[in-house]
Image (tube, coloured by chain):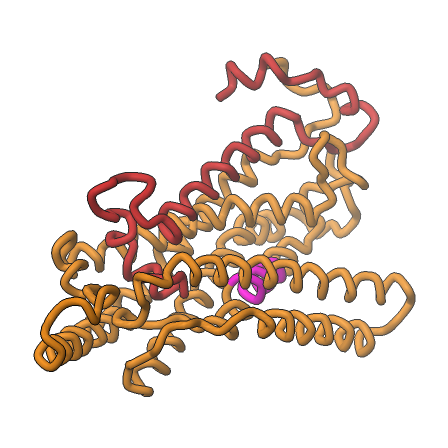
Amino acid sequence: MSPHTVGTTVAPESAAAHPATVRTRDWLIVAAAAIVALIALYAVFVDNGDLVSATGSYLHEFSHDGRHLFGAPCH
Amino acid sequence: MSVSAQPTPYPLLPLLGRGLAAGGIAGLASGLFSLLLAEPLMDRAIRLEEKRSAAEAATAHAGASHSGHSHAAEAEELFSRGTQHLGLVVTAVVAGLAIGVFFTLAYALSRGLRPGGSPNRSAPRDDGRDWQRSMGLAGAGFLALSLLPALRYPANPPGVGDGGTVTERQGLWLAALVIGVLGTVLAHQVHQRLGQAGHGLPVRQSGAAAAVVATLAALFLLPDNPDAVPVPATLLWDFRMLSLGGQVVLWGVLGAVFAAPSLRRQRSAPRERSASSTP
């Protein structure tokens, strides 16, 4: 993560003007985490065999009980 | 990676760590709650379904009529019920971790931090209101993502759900989640704006309640769940209550664990209410 983001991060020029700021790098990491989280939520609650396997919906069946309990549609 | 100029950057990454830890613990707690209380019901629902489809197969000569009802048989082929019990806990933990990330994001935004690096006002490390903010956010999350969608599309036990309509139902469910979030944000905005306009709590809370009712009305404009629910009423009621109960555990533990470190800080440090007094 950091080698990539350090390259693209602009120096926090606004840092001096404010008592508390968030580094751009930190925002990027949190944004990346949010994307991973969305994919994970899709995998456990929505996927019907498109992500992992063409022969069976393994993710669907493994998370089957959780889907029912969280109110996610199930077959 | 040059280490900070003198104004210390807001510690967003530790906050993310807190969100992940709280989410994981909350997911585990919710998963264990459901494992103990809801799994017996689900196992019973699956046995009932097997009986039902066996009876169906006996009357109508097995095949054509029940394309979407191979549920139990199919589930057993891929994973045993024991594995699916484990899957429930894993699913809950994964969901908890993911929700923890968004909880962190919402929390940071609610403290006035904006993407782009600058807070819209000075964002103190700890203004002594972390507990209220965290629990309030957890309550909002429950309302937006659990309660409101569940009022429109309540959870159904195994044995309910036609494979042929699953895509349609997923669309409806996701729409309900989006409406739940938008409605909750709207209610919060109404509450804030009325306050800024100088109104007291009775008016502000009535306004927020009206926003929630409007959201419910919007949810009921969505089409009904197309599937039949051939499940005994008591089993269905118990399952739905336990479904909501598991989500109460998830959000409650998430909010509490997320705020817990600030409680300790508050106790050990002398009480300072003034914003950003510590350098």
Rendered location of residue B141, percent (x, y): 56, 60
Q: Position of residue B167 (x, y in %)?
A: 40, 57
Write down the quadrant of residue B48 in the picture.
bottom left
Q: Is residue A23 left or right of residue A37?
A: right
Q: Classify residue B113 by image quadrant.
A: top right
Q: Start and end of the magenta stretch? A: B136-145
- Is B140 magenta? The answer is yes
- Identify the main secondary structure in magenta: helix
**Where is residue B251 shown, x and y percent of the image?**
49, 61
Q: Which is nearer the eye, A53 or B85?
A: A53
Residue at image coords 11%, 71%:
B62
Seen at 49% across and 54% down, the residue is B257
Name the one closer to the observer, B178 or B141.
B178
- The residue depicted at 74 percent of the width and 44 percent of the height is B112
Q: Find residue B275 and report its horizontal and vertical position in percent.
A: 78, 45
- Give the quarter of the image for residue B168: bottom left
Task: Give the quarter of the figure containing the C terminus of chain A.
Answer: bottom left
Q: Spot the orange chain and give its letter.
A: B
Judge whether residue B202 is colored magenta: no
Q: Residue furthest right?
A: B198
B34 or A65: which is nearer to us?
A: A65
Q: Residue at x 28, y 61 (%)?
A: A65
Residue that extends furthest to the bottom in the rendered view of this protein: B233
Taking the image as shown, residue B43 lies to the left or right of residue B100, namely left
Chain in red, by letter, is A
Q: Is residue B206 left or right of residue B135?
A: right
